[in-house]
Image (cartoon, grey):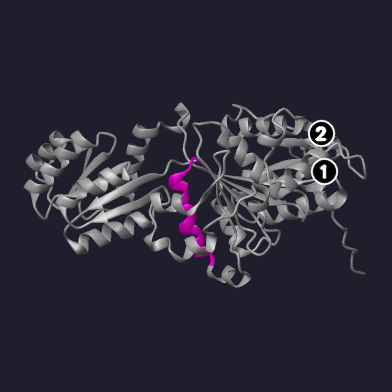
Amino acid sequence: MSNVLRLALVDPNDSTRETVKAMLLGLETVWLEADCSRYEFFPDIVDQTSPDVGVVNLDSDQNKAIDLISRLSQSSPDTVILAASESNDGQLILTAIRSGAREFLTLPLSEEELASALQRVSQQKFGSAERGGRGSEIIAVAGATGGVGTTSVAVNLGCVLAEDPKNSVALVDLDLALGDADVFLDAIPDYTLADVVQNISRLDIQLLKKSLTKHSSGLYLLPRPVELRDTEVVDPESLRKVMGLMKASFSHLIVDLSKTYSPIDMVAIESASRVILVTQLDLPCLRNVVRLMMSFDETEGLQDKVEIVVNRAGLDSGQISLKKAKETLGREIFALLPNDYRTMIEVRNNGVPLVTQAPKAAITQAYREMAHKIVEPPQTTEAVDGEEAGGANESGWKRFWPVKSAKA
């Protein structure tokens, strides 16, 4: 999980400003909140946007720039100031640091130098992962087949996470044609993913939040487009930009995928820090889990992000035992969500999440336990028993896969 730094830049020189902007836009852990060409306007920008980092280029007018750093260090102490200059004069460096700059960057910058400086700022501001620092997590919710309850999982997990005031949570409905996350929340959104995509170049964090629909649970929703023809404006590159801005805005971003595993779905999966794969304990679902895991194995590190969640556990009809499923898959089950047909029908028909409709129900508690495992992961994960683990990823999968007949 990485922390996203929101950054504002001031540089009256168009050439160097554009060069630094291009470098910043290439860093996944940075969101460029604003850029400015006038020193005198920059304090207002910092006051309005409250960025984590402010970069001040000194070269156009060193005296104005130093005065600006001194002013910002007093008026906006939560914004870390980085000074930048083509000069490496020791006196200038000392003056900038004494005025309140955290670091001095020598131009022209390399991407490695900039990333390293921002990493130091991130560790100082948020704390390192080893010290328990919290960052932004993207959770992609995928299904082993249609009808296993991925939208229900995405919506109710989001609402449970949003119960904690320390969390800020948003849900993106990426089932562009048939998504119904808005129905689960009884929401009538003013804007959709298509609107945000078409205006992404003009959006900042404040405007983004105004474009989202906030549910009473605290969950923010960005629904799928209303018209089918509007789905065409959402492409992989525009989705990356939207997710980058939302990652800078929320502690948890949940993406409800379609069932097609399209290129757009794969952008979300590859960007995610965790992929929740929802299944049921029946043969068609488990075969699809096997198939998906084999496909994920083609992308380095993707399998390690996948957490298998069993929905409707305890459904009697045609279910395979949990032990048999774990033996076949060769991995642990991340969470079990019990079968509660009556409650889930009420939740869907009323457009009310579980935390509101049935806060004490067993299924709601199961969601809370899953959310706790996401926010506070255990120090060590329980390993599968030796007999199950040894060769299970291959031999177990093959037991669920047709054997090709040998050619004569």
- Residue at image position (76%, 45%) is 393
Question: What secondary structure is found at the residue carrying circle 2?
Answer: helix
Decide whether residue 320 is among the magenta residues.
no
Is 351 in front, or is 150? 351
**What number is the disc on residue 371?**
none
- Residue at image position (32%, 38%) is 121
Q: Position of residue 195 (x, y in %)?
A: 49, 63
Question: Which part of the image, by quadrant, shows the C terminus?
Answer: bottom right
**What number is the disc on residue 387?**
2
Residue type at tag 2: Glu
Decide whether residue 237 is among the magenta residues.
yes
Please name the predominant secondary structure of the magenta segment in the image: helix
Residue type at tag 1: Thr
Kindly indicate the quadrant of the structure image that contains residue 126.
top left
Question: What secondary structure is found at the residue carrying circle 1?
Answer: helix
- Residue at image position (43%, 51%) is 28
- Furthest-bottom residue in this view: 229
Q: Is residue 402 left or right of residue 366?
A: right
Q: Position of residue 380 (x, y in %)?
A: 62, 27
How many marks do you count on the picture?
Answer: 2
Residue indicated by mark 1? 328
Q: Position of residue 304 (x, y in %)?
A: 63, 44
Task: Classify 10 Å Cα crowding around label 2: few (below 14), some (14-19), many (20 and above).
Answer: few
Residue bounds of the magenta highlight: 234-252
Q: Is residue 313 left or right of residue 275?
A: right
Kindly indicate the quadrant of the structure image that contains residue 15.
bottom left
Nearer-N-terminus badge (2/1): 1
Q: Position of residue 200 (x, y in %)?
A: 43, 61
- Residue at image position (23%, 41%) is 81
